[in-house]
Image (cartoon, rainbow, N blue to C red):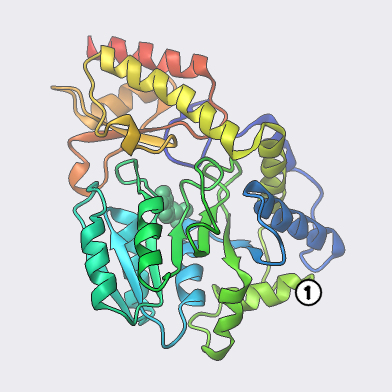
Amino acid sequence: MNILLNPGPVVLSDRVRNALSKPDLCHREQEFIDLQNKIRTELLNVYDLPADKWAGIVFTGSGTSAMEGMMTSIIPAHGKVLIIENGVYGERLTKIAKIHNISHVVLHHEWGDEIDLQKLEGELQYHEELSHIAVVHHETTTGRLNNIDAIAEVCKKHGNVPILLDGVSSFAAEEIKFDEWNIDACAATANKCCHAVPGTSFVIADRKAIEQMSATPARTLYLDLVTYLKNQDNDGTPFTQSVQTFYALAEALDELKDNGGWQKRQQQYWKLMDIVRNGLEKLNIKPYFDKEDCSCVLNAFHLPEGVSYQELHDKLKAAGFVIYAGQGGFEKSLFRISCMGEIKESDMERFISEMGKIIS
Ligand SMILES: Cc1ncc(COP(=O)(O)O)c(C=O)c1O
């Protein structure tokens, strides 16, 4: 079986894989509701969030559905969002705003650039009408971990504008300060740092932010979080859910807790990423960013001289490792390595050894 070094789907633990074959369930039966309730509780427990303030809203779809649910269901009709872009996923937030006619302004940066706090402050001063800021936490395009501490500080100075966070590739492995950052909602998915399978996504939302939406007509039928929350709080679900992927997520969240929570997962990812960074450095393959700018989840590296991505990918795949290409303009210059999933230190050492054989 291949070791997946792409940023999700991930290599599953036996425990999560086995959960997929639990008994078939009807999504209108109590057993499913118990499963859904368990997931909702455990999602909040990942960051010790109290259930009277926060709600975990879970549904069938990929990470983008959670982004789209968050953007369409939290920004009121009279609201306006400032979207910060410095990669593919920030730009995707803008696409969502455009498609749904959500009033927005964009603070654009080149992919990978550090977010310019002075420009952010300028936008907040100029657009006093802003109701939200939307930003990606870990911009998987380049592996940059955006500095939400600093962004939240600027927001606090200007009316405490709440944040909509794309936590799709950081939830369960990076620190997320829900209260301190004044987060209204965080979108994430099962098949990345949670170590479950693709098919289930979720939004952690401040209940008040959802309540304020009752005056705004729903912008979508399937992704309307107001509808989901109402149904899920009343032991229901508006649509048929992907039962087996719910099983996997419930098991993966238990596994995360048993293994020491997001903090231990972060430590483990860094242990693996250090093997990769140090090993590649010895092969003269340079990381795109210094460690302090990166997420533990994924780092980008310059392609070695004279080796195309396709050649590197194919040789590594033949050796049992799936790596990930650079996106868009980075296609020919970068490759990406992720540490998510059931990956051991010995796997990463073997990966480095295979890289060494290819380079030489
Ligand atoms: C930060 C971020 N946001 C959103 C997404 C989109 O997730 P999906 O491909 O599951 O729709 C990804 C996927 O890699 C991501 O890394």
Give, as a three-letter code, the residue at label 1: Asn
Quadrant of the drawing holding the C terminus: top left
- Residue 175 placed where, x, y %? 51, 44
For residue 281, side relative to residue 57 (left or right): left
Whether residue 214 is situated above or below residue 114 in the rendered picture:
below
Q: Secondary structure at mark 1?
A: loop
Residue wearing tag 1: 234
Residue 97's image quarter?
bottom left
For residue 262, side relative to residue 92 (left or right): right
Whether residue 42 is situated above or below residue 4 in the rendered picture:
below
- Residue 215 placed where, x, y %? 55, 90
- Residue 356 placed where, x, y %? 30, 11
Determine the residue positioned at 34% across, 15% down: 279
Extreme-right residue of the structure: 30
Determine the residue positioned at 36% across, 45% down: 140
Extreme-left residue of the structure: 306
Whether residue 241 is situated above or below residue 39 in the rendered picture:
below
Q: Is 300 in front, or is 152? A: 152
